Structure formats: C-alpha cells, structure tokens
Amino acid sequence: MRHLMSPLDLTVEELDQLLDLANDIERNPEKYAHTCDGKRLATLFYEPSTRTRLSFEAAMMNLGGKVLGFSSAASSSAAKGESVSDTIRMASCYADICAMRHPKEGAPLVASMVSRIPVINAGDGGHQHPTQTLTDLLTIRSLKGRLNNLTIGLCGDLKFGRTVHSLIEALVRYTGIRFILISPEELRVPDYIREDVLRAKNVPFEEVIRLEDALPKLDLLYMTRVQKERFFNEDDYVRMKDFYILDKAKMELAGPDMLVLHPLPRVNEISVEVDNDPRAAYFKQVQYGVYVRMALILTLLEVTV
C-alpha cells in the first residue's frame, strides 16, 4: 500500500506514467467511468478548500466511486478533541482511500503511519501540496509539450506558498530548468528551498522584486496569492496583499507563448482583464486537476484498465 505525501514520493518514471494515464483519461473518459464502482473516497478536510476538495470529489465520481467526509474541522470530531490518528483509523473502516488537508505540517504523514487505506496529502500547512504539483506538471506538459528546458517565474508569496515549494522540488528533477523568484524581501523562498534544493542541485535561479523585470524572460509565470491565513500580523498582510497585480499592460511585456498559471483562488493578483488572454491557463489548470487526481486514485488503488 502506498501513500502520497510529497511529489518526491513518485520517481520521475512513475510521474511520467501518471501523467500519461491522466492524458488518456482526458482523451477517453468513458473508458474509466466505472473503474471505481463500489469504491469510496474519504475527504478529511480540516481547512477550507473549494478546488481541491471538489476536484477530488469530481475525480472519484467520474470513476464511478462515491465520496464521504467533512469540509472543516468544526464539522468533525476534531472539534471534540479527536486526534488525526484516531480519525483516520475510523475513516479506514468506511472508505478505500483518503484525501486529507490539514493546517498542521506533517498531519497527513502522521495519519498515513496508522492508516489501513492509502492517504493522499491534500495540503498540510505551508509545507506540501503534492496533488496541486501534479496538476501543475500535467498542465505544463500538456500545453508546453515538455517539462524540461523552461524558464519559470514564481511570483508572490514564496515563503508560505506550499504550491511553490512542491513545484520547485518536483521540477528540479528535470533538465534545463531555470527559476526567476519574484517576491518582496519579506516573502522570499525559505532558506531550505534556496540552499537544500536549488543550490544543492545546481539549478540556476535569480531573485528579483519587480515582476516587470522578469516577464520578458519567461516561458511560464506561476502567480500566487498572498495568503491571509498564513500571516500572524494583519498589518503585514495588508501591506503585502497587493504587492503584485498582473494586468493587461504587464502581459504586453511577456512573450507570445508564455503561459500564466495560478493554483487559485486568486484575490487581486491577476486582473480579470487577463482572463481572455490566450496565455491565461489557470482555468484549464483546474480541469487538468480532475484528470490527474483520477489517475492518482487509480494508481494508489492499483486499479488497472
């Protein structure tokens, strides 16, 4: 039995197989419509979510399975003091696979150590968000045709953004990857990403403050929101939240083939006027998230078609 806590739990070869499966699901959805008949997915979400939770639910239902779970800690026995370990032991009696989101880093890992069913980390604090990373990789590979030889700009909250941390760790395994890290000083990537991942693997990167300076160089721009829920100080959040706004004027600085991705939800960091730009790929990204989660559920349940 396997769990997914980090994108690094999958080898590059396994990752390519997963993305190939997701692309086949995209092309032939009817072929997979009953592959999980009689199977149940438990969604244990201790933290608010729209896209990730609904994406998991849509994925399981598209495979013919059913879904049960809760969408906030307040609506679960966690409000009575039940531990994560006890909750997953209970869920193991009801479901065949589990997706867990939790505000505490490492909580899904704790759950996986006692679970009798596969556990998928659906986001743990500011740490990891592996299924978002799988979504990002599928989107990039499907729209760009490759996962190597890319200059990628990561913009916004690079300190607390778990999607950014996971994506960097996944992409450094491919050749020809270069990062431009765009953030204010206060929201730069953590030292462990800079030193233990980028420098340790000799991945070229530069850190800049101005988005305008980076745009002409990019194959891909990955925007992130400044996350209010990760700030301890309201004043700091207010000061940072509108630091970057991608609008039509800034898009004119970018190349004709640059893609814009965003894990969503967005607040103010991408103007709605960008939505109609053919380079805006963030809603396509949402659709790819369903396909990749379908592929992941099949892989962890060891269902073959």
Image (cartoon, rainbow, N blue to C red):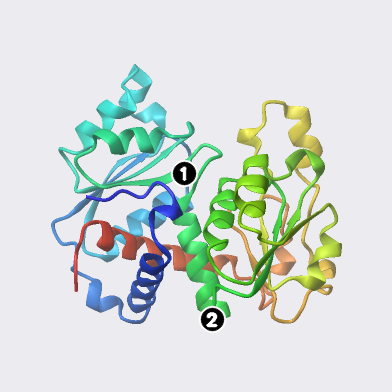
Query: Residue drawn at (62%, 52%), measured in percent from left and top?
Result: 200
Q: Residues within 10 Å of mark 2 (few under 14, many from 20)?
A: few
- Compared with 228, 5 (above or below) is below
- Compared with 64, 78 (above or below) is above
Q: Is residue 6 visible?
A: yes
Q: Residue 201, how many percent across, how many down?
A: 61, 57
Q: Residue 22, how many percent across, how many down?
A: 37, 71
Q: Residue 197, how many percent across, how many down?
A: 60, 51
Query: Residue drawn at (72%, 50%), measured in percent from left and top?
Result: 156
The image quarter in which residue 290 lies? bottom left
Label 1 sits on a secondary structure element that is strand
Label 2 sits on a secondary structure element that is loop
Per the rendering, the mark at residue 123 is 1
Looking at numbered disc 1 in the image, what kind of residue is underneath it?
Gly
216 or 12, which lies in front?
A: 12
Per the rendering, the mark at residue 145 is 2
Looking at numbered disc 2 in the image, what kind of residue is underneath it?
Gly
Q: Is residue 71 left or right of residue 207?
A: left
Q: Is residue 93 left or right of residue 249?
A: left
Quick check: marks 2 and 1 in contact, CB under 8 Å?
no
Q: CA distance from mark 2 to mark 1?
A: 27 Å
Query: Residue drawn at (19%, 62%), measured in percent from left and top?
Result: 36
242 or 22, which lies in front?
A: 22
Between marks 2 and 1 in the image, the one whose residue lies nearer the viewer: 2
Per the rendering, the mark at residue 23 is none
- Compared with 1, 291 (above or below) is below
Q: Is residue 266 visible?
A: no
Q: Is residue 297 left or right of residue 188?
A: left
Is the C terminus in the top left, top right, bottom left or bottom right quadrant? bottom left
